[in-house]
Structure formats: structure tokens, C-alpha cells
Amino acid sequence: MKSLRNILGKGGLALAAGLLLLGTPAAQAQDAVAGKAIFEGNCSACHSLEADVVGPALKDAHKRRGDEWLVKFIKNSQELVQAGDKDAVALFEKFNKVPMPAFGGSLSDEDIANVIAYIKAESDKPAEAAVEVPAAPAADPGANAVAPAEVPFMKLPALVHFTIALIGVIFLLIVLVLIMMFRLFVPMLGDSIYNGEFQGSFAGRVLFLLRGDTSLMTGKVKDEIHSHHDFDGIQEYDNDLPPWWKTMFYASIVFAVGYMLHYHVFMTGALQTEEYEAEMEQAALLAALTPDDPNAVTNYEALTDAAALASGKSIFSTNCAACHGQEGQGTVGPNLTDEYWLHGGDVNEIFKTVKYGVPAKGMVPWQGKLTKDQMLEVSSYILSLQGSNPANAKEPQGDKE
């Protein structure tokens, strides 16, 4: 009998131990399930397991810091920073000094333990093998756009080639004729080229320019003083303007006449306004081909029906309340209930802030996580919070709208 009791006693201990061992993974799995819901409701806006977002990637965080440190950090990260904790200060500095909301008042110890259990469970999952999918041929976004055709020079019409060649030949012939005349007639002139009258003529100045005399371009100094043009010892000389300057002046007059005829008389050229309108049309076509362009113009109207605002409130509570407060009063992020805005208070500006985020200030982009309709609903809900004056509202930031 004694031996049987001993056997049963030992067997009972073994059975209890076995049940505990069998029950532990199930309990941990249950904790991880509860932790996932808490994580998605409070942490996913700023954290990812695999990559840094507003805050650090959380995979294997328990191995780097330990459970006790994680509990303290989740409850109130700023207490650790102010206490000079090396790891907390390093994270605070690395992530642009964006303070993590203190969850000590909103999450119980059990909730925090469940979140850590979820992080552990996700960290211990084996990496999924990447499945290579053959790349589909990318659709050409500009297939339907009319692009200006560029014609190579060699494919221009034969008449164009002939005209250009003819102009080149005529120019060369003119140059050759001038050179031949110069070589023929200059020796025939002999010493008469030094005659003052010939030197002052245009042909003489061209000739001596070719010999190194630059008076054709600079003119000659007369050193003649205007009569009665002497003021306090300052004398005015009657010198011509340099010929090169006068030539440019006359050329500018010819250019101005041609410009006026081209743009204002015959209307063969596009003025600045027309060029601007054409460029804006081209930009609109490009923006239509790239719907994710942050500069694309949107013309949404704020939603006002109860169903849309209720949906927006649900989205806000799930994704935005961690940084802006459940009532939009502002915590880490700005107060959304006053008249001051950092990035514009129109529904289209709020929509773009939600969609593209402001990563430099800790605001994550929500495109890819929320649909266009969801982003418009949450933007409209944010506008509906104006003037609600919640308790403990954060001080105004930005410009008054």
C-alpha cells in the first residue's frame, strides 16, 4: 500500500508537471493573441517589428533590453530618460527626441506583459522563405500620352538637307571671294594704303584690322575738348563711342523690331503667359500619371454624414489616438481641436498630411495602410473636433487658420 501511495504521489507530481509544461505554450500563445490586439490598437502607429518607423523596430527587443526594462519604458519612457538611463536616452536622441506616450495609466501590467509576449512570439517566428514571382512587364504609364516626336537630323527631308548645304556653300564662296580680292587688290594699292583718307575709310580700317590695328573696333581718341565744357577742372572730351558698342546698339534695335514682329504682330511665338499655361497643362498630365504625387491638386469636400464621421472616429481611435489623444487633445502629436495647424487645416491639406505623413516630426504616412475613403473619413472627423475643448488640451502649435 505504501509503495502504491508513493507511486501515485510521484506519478501525480509528474502528471502535474507535465500538465504545466503542456499548458505553458498554450498560455503564452493566448497572451500573444491578446498582446497583438493591444499592440495594433496602441503601438502599430509608431512601431513595426521589422523596421524603424517613428520608433525603433521591436523584433528581439526583449533580448536586447530585458522584460523589466521594457515594462518600465512602456509605462513611462520619459521617466527613464530623465533618470539618465543610457539605453532610453540613446533611443530618445536617435528618434528625433519624439517622446513615446506613457501607457502606465491606460494599460495594466497584464496588458503590457501580453504586448511583450506578442513581441517575443513574433520575434521567434522563423523567417519565411521569399517566393520569387516572375516580374510582370511594367505597364508604360505614358503609353496613352502624346509625346513630341524627335526627328534625327539625318531623317529630315532631303529639301532641308539641300537648303542647309546650299547656305554653307554660298557662305564659303563669299569668304573665298573676299580673300582672293584682298590678295589681289592690296598689293596693287602699294603705299597708298597709308594715305590718311584711305585709312579713315571703312575698307582701310578693315585692312588694318587684319594687320593688327584695332581702331575699327575701339575707335580713335580725338583728345578734343568740348568748348566751355570745363567744370571745376573736369573736362569733357568729344570722343566717339567705341564702334563695337554702337554696332551692338544697332543690332539690339534690329532684334527688337524682329522680336515685336515675331511675338506681337505675326503671333508666331508664344508669350510668357502662353508658355506658362502650356507647362501647367503638361504638369497636370504628368500628375495624372503619378497619383501618388504629393503636389497633385485635390478637391475633396469634408464629409458630414454621421456614418462617415463614425467610421472616421473608429479609425482615429485605432491609429491616431496614441499620439494625438482619444479626444484629439494632443499628446506626442499636436492638439487637433484648436484653430492652429502645422501643415494646414483644410480637409485637402489634412488628407495629404495623413496620406504622406511628416516623417521628420514623427508623423507616419498612412497610404498603403488606409484606403483613400478611410483617409478622407478620418480627415473629416478631425475637422469635426474643432472647438470641442477637451480637458488637458495641448498648447496651440502652428498658424491660425
Image (tube, rainbow, N blue to C red):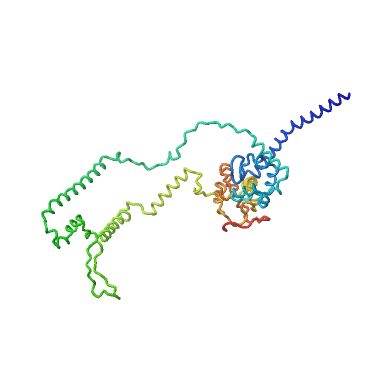
| In the image: residue 276, left or right of residue 222 | right
In the displayed structure, would residue 175 be above or below residue 242? above
Q: Nearer the viewer, residue 346 or 300?
A: 346
Relative side of 259 to 13, left or right: left
Image: 240 above or below 43? below
Q: Residue at x 81, y 29 (%)?
A: 13
**Residue 195 on image: x %, y %:** 13, 61
Q: Is residue 401 at all visible to an observer of this figure?
A: no
Relative to 244, say whether 28 is above or below: above
Most foreground residue, 263 or 307: 263
Number of numbered labels in the structure image: 0
Give residue 59's position: percent from left, percent from top. Answer: 63, 39
Query: Image quadrant for the N terminus?
Result: top right
Work out whether residue 142 can be spotted: yes
On the image, which quarter does residue 162 sit in?
Answer: top left
- Front-lying residue, 195 or 180: 195
Instruction: Residue 355 in the image: state x and y as whole percent.
Output: 56, 46
Q: Is residue 142 left or right of residue 3?
A: left
Residue depicted at 22% across the width and 70% down the height: 224
**In this rendering, would 305 be left or right of 28?**
left
**Which image quarter holds the C terminus?**
bottom right
